[in-house]
């Protein structure tokens, strides 16, 4: 079971037998590689026993974010040299964008704006804000407003 993330999807497909499963697996693998090449995808049978996730997993730690990222790339490059290894995946890789503001509190107060409302407005612009919900069959789906890039 995976945690709820906007960037993650999971599906379970049940077939009538092993031969049928392999046919479906091959078709899905081809479709994912050709039509969704930019996505990180993986097809695997359900795991029985303790969950293992990816067959090989390494945790890289360091003093700085960039140093840790560089070390993780080095580990991935070393592992990738083995011809039996494919689909190297990072679960922490992209540097996050950050926004630093200096607010002149006196001017903000003169405009009648509180620090809280300013923070909420900035959060809505950068991260989005749920403005309503839309019913989809029996589910309620949040409708989120976000600023354009």
Image: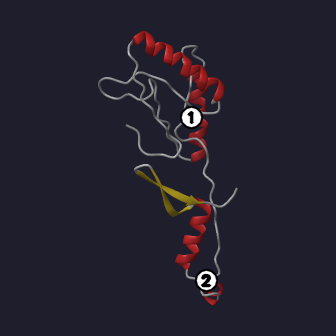
Task: Check disc 1: other Cα within 10 Å, few if <14, some if 14-19, many if 20+.
Answer: many
Eye-nearest disc, 1 or 2: 2
Q: Quadrant of residue 147?
A: bottom right
Q: Secondary structure at mark 2?
A: helix
Task: Check disc 2: other Cα within 10 Å, few if <14, some if 14-19, many if 20+.
Answer: few
What percent of the width, then of the height, locates residue 95? Answer: 61, 48
Q: Quadrant of residue 68?
A: top right
Q: Quadrant of residue 78?
A: top right
Residue at horizontal 56 percent and vertical 47 percent from the top: 64
What percent of the width, then of the height, locates residue 57? Answer: 46, 29
Residue at horizontal 58 percent and vertical 13 percent from the top: 83
Identify which residue, 92 or 112, lies in the foreground: 112
Please state, as top left, top right, bottom left or bottom right, where the C terminus lies in the image. Answer: bottom right
What percent of the width, then of the height, locates residue 23? Answer: 50, 13
Drawn side of residue 93 relative to residue 50, left or right? right
On screen, residue 80 above or below 69: above
Residue positioned most to the left: 49
Compare marks 1 and 2 and give the one earlier in the sequence: 1
What percent of the width, then of the height, locates residue 25? Answer: 50, 18
Residue at horizontal 52 percent and vertical 38 percent from the top: 91
On screen, residue 129 above or below 79: below
Task: Identify the residue under disc 1.
Answer: 72
Q: Secondary structure at mark 1?
A: helix
Q: On residue 105, which mark appears?
A: 2
As measured in the structure, the alpha-carbon distance from the residue carrying label 1 to the one carrying label 2 is 42 Å
Residue at horizontal 47 percent and vertical 31 percent from the top: 58
């Amino acid at each position: 079971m995976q945690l709820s993330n906007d960037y993650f999807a999971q599906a379970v497909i049940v077939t009538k037998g092993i031969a049928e499963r392999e046919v479906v697996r091959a078709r899905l693998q081809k479709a994912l590689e050709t039509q969704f090449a930019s996505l990180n995808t993986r097809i695997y049978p359900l795991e029985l026993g303790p969950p293992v996730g990816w067959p090989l997993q390494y945790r890289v730690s360091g003093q700085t974010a960039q140093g840790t990222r560089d070390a993780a790339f080095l580990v991935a490059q070393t592992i990738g040299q083995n011809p039996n290894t494919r689909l190297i995946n990072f679960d922490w890789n992209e540097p996050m964008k950050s926004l630093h503001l200096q607010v002149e509190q006196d001017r903000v107060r003169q405009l009648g704006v509180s620090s809280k409302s300013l923070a909420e407005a900035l959060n809505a612009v950068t991260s989005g804000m749920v403005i309503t919900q839309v019913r989809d069959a029996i589910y309620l789906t949040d409708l989120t407003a976000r600023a354009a890039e």
